[in-house]
């Protein structure tokens, strides 16, 4: 479908595009994929709202972006996705500051952290990666619907293959906690959310999920040597070529989410899971998706559970 590939960079997928006038909001912009996405999109003229938990680190990221894009139109905002009160506070501020949002990029996340709970009592990975972005998107929906053909791009991962969501014990109240299991559940939740958002609002917006690839960023800061070795072993076992885990550069890692945010090519692929700047295919390996995604009953059930947990209705 796309002329881009695994090696394509974020700069390449927006080459020639004029994004002037577009309002693009990105969570998790202090480093890594969020910062690179913000830089590339600002370079094409977009107004980029940078959202992060740490204001100082966010300012430093903005300074780095302006060092290469001097006229970048950036604004910096504080939001902690592991705290629903913070999500609500930011949404209230956004309603006063923005008239619309053209693209919402749900990029932030945590990975394989030790067991912890969010401010609202949810398991940290499920609570941040899924519920935080679920509430964030719900509260920003009025601004999204003010845009012409808005897009919501939600970062998932090939890690979704580790496990589907557990609707009976999403917060590890009965299941022994395992960092990889919790991560896999949260990443499956991201795919289910994007698909259900498309099902419910597909006539008004585009919603997709994205696997960026394996990129060395601060997301993996909690991973031990043993966890890394386990990840490599799983990747090799599931790879039909036997090559195992293949790392991407940061520039290529950001390409798929930037492509999802801007490309006219995906307009007919609402609700899909994307990898390597294309709609992913089922199967094993780094970019194949597991059979438990694209499951409407699970997507609907997770949506309803999430609405109850965050006390919000779309």
Image (cartoon, grey):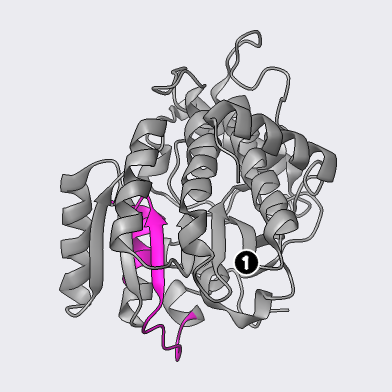
Q: Which residue lies under the disc numbered 1?
A: 205
Using the image as rendered, state which of residue 79 and residue 214 is in the foreground: 79
Residue, x 74% and y 75% (percent of image)? 268
Residue, x 79% and y 37% (percent of image)? 298
Residue, x 32% and y 62% (percent of image)? 49
What secondary structure is marked by label 1? loop
50 within the magenta span: no
Q: Position of residue 238 (x, y in %)?
A: 75, 43
> Is 56 placed above or below 102 here?
above
27 within the magenta span: yes
Horizontally, residue 142 falls left or right of residue 80, namely: right
In this rendering, the count of numbered labels is 1
| Mark 1 surroundings: few (<14), some (14-19) or many (≥20) residues within 10 A | many
Using the image as rendered, state which of residue 286 and residue 226 is in the foreground: 286
Residue 10 lies in quadrant = bottom left
Which region is colored magenta? 14-39
Q: Residue placed farthest to the bottom in the image?
A: 16
Where, quadrant-wise, is the N terminus in this rendering?
Answer: bottom right
Horizontally, residue 64 falls left or right of residue 273, namely: left
Q: Position of residue 16 (x, y in %)?
A: 45, 91
Q: Position of residue 218 (x, y in %)?
A: 35, 43
Residue, x 55% and y 59% (percent of image)? 153
Is any atom of residue 168 visible in this view?
yes
> Is 188 placed above or below 33 here?
above
> Is 291 placed above or below 14 here?
above
> Is 267 placed above or below 135 here?
below
Is any atom of residue 253 visible in this view?
no
Horizontally, residue 12 falls left or right of residue 236, namely: left
Q: Position of residue 221 (x, y in %)?
A: 37, 35
């Amino acid at each position: 479908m796309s002329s881009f590939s695994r090696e394509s960079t974020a700069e390449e997928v927006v080459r020639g595009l004029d994004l002037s006038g577009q309002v693009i909001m990105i969570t998790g912009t202090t480093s890594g994929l969020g910062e690179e996405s913000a830089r590339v999109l600002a370079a094409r003229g977009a107004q980029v709202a940078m959202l992060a938990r740490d204001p100082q680190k966010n300012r430093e990221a903005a300074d780095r972006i302006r060092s290469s894009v001097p006229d970048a139109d950036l604004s910096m905002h504080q939001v902690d996705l592991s705290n629903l009160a913070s999500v609500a506070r930011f949404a209230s501020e956004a309603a006063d500051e923005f008239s619309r949002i053209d693209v919402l990029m749900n990029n932030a996340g945590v990975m394989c952290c030790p067991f912890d709970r969010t401010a609202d009592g949810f398991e940290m990975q499920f609570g941040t990666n899924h519920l935080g972005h679920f509430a964030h998107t719900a509260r920003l929906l009025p601004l999204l619907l003010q845009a012409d053909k808005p897009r919501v791009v939600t970062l998932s991962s090939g890690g979704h293959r580790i496990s589907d969501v557990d609707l009976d014990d999403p917060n590890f109240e009965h299941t022994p906690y395992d960092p990889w299991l919790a991560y896999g559940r949260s990443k499956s939740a991201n795919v289910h959310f994007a698909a259900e958002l498309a099902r419910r609002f597909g006539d008004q917006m585009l919603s997709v999920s994205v696997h960026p690839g394996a990129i060395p960023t601060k997301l993996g800061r909690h991973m031990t040597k043993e966890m890394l070795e386990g990840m490599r072993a799983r990747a090799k076992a599931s790879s039909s070529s036997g090559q195992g885990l293949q790392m991407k550069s940061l520039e290529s890692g950001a390409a798929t989410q930037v492509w999802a945010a801007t490309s006219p090519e995906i307009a007919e692929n609402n609700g899909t899971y994307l990898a390597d700047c294309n709609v992913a295919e089922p199967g094993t390996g780094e970019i194949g998706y597991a059979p438990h995604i694209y499951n409407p009953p699970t997507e609907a059930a997770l949506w309803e559970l999430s609405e109850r947990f965050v006390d919000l209705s779309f």
